[in-house]
Image (cartoon, grey):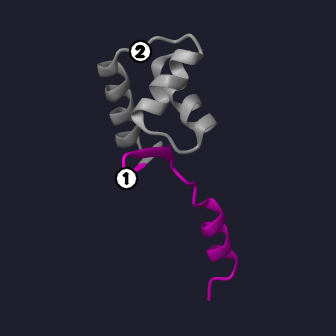
């Protein structure tokens, strides 16, 4: 798995995580990332729209497909 995959898996597992939480989880899983590599990967995932950042906590971006389906169903 590449860096992107490991970081996504870490955040999926932790649900809400700071950069330090992600680094700790990766270390526990036996994956060693430099601080620079982790920060670069997190920034890339933010730009791609895969993650959200609020109050220094990362989480997977919510999918709004449920709301879109509801709106289409009951659209006036």
Percent coordinates x, y for residue 36 in the rendering: 29, 20
Looking at the image, which residue is at 51% across and 49% down? 61
Residue 19 placement, left or right of 6: left
Q: Is residue 63 magenta?
A: yes
Residue farthest to the right, as pictured: 73
Element under disc 2: loop
Where residue 33 is drawn, which disc sits there? 2
- Name the quadrant containing residue 20: top left
Q: Is residue 14 above or below residue 31?
A: below
Looking at the image, which residue is at 57% across and 17% down? 28
- Name the quadrant containing residue 30: top right
Where residue 26 is drawn, which disc sits there? none
The span shown in magenta is: 53-76
Name the residue beneath numbered marker 1.
55
Looking at the image, which residue is at 48% across and 32% down? 21
Answer with mark 2 or mark 1, whichever residue precedes in sequence.
Answer: 2
Please name whichever residue, 53 or 69, is drawn nearer the observer in this view of the structure: 53
């Amino acid at each position: 798995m590449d860096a992107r995959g490991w970081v996504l898996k870490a955040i999926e597992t932790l649900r809400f995580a700071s950069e330090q939480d992600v680094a700790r989880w990766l270390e526990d899983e036996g994956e060693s990332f430099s601080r620079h590599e982790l920060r670069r990967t997190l920034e890339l995932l933010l730009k791609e729209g895969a993650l959200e950042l609020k109050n220094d906590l990362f989480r997977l971006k919510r999918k709004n497909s449920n709301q879109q389906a509801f709106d289409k169903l009951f659209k006036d």
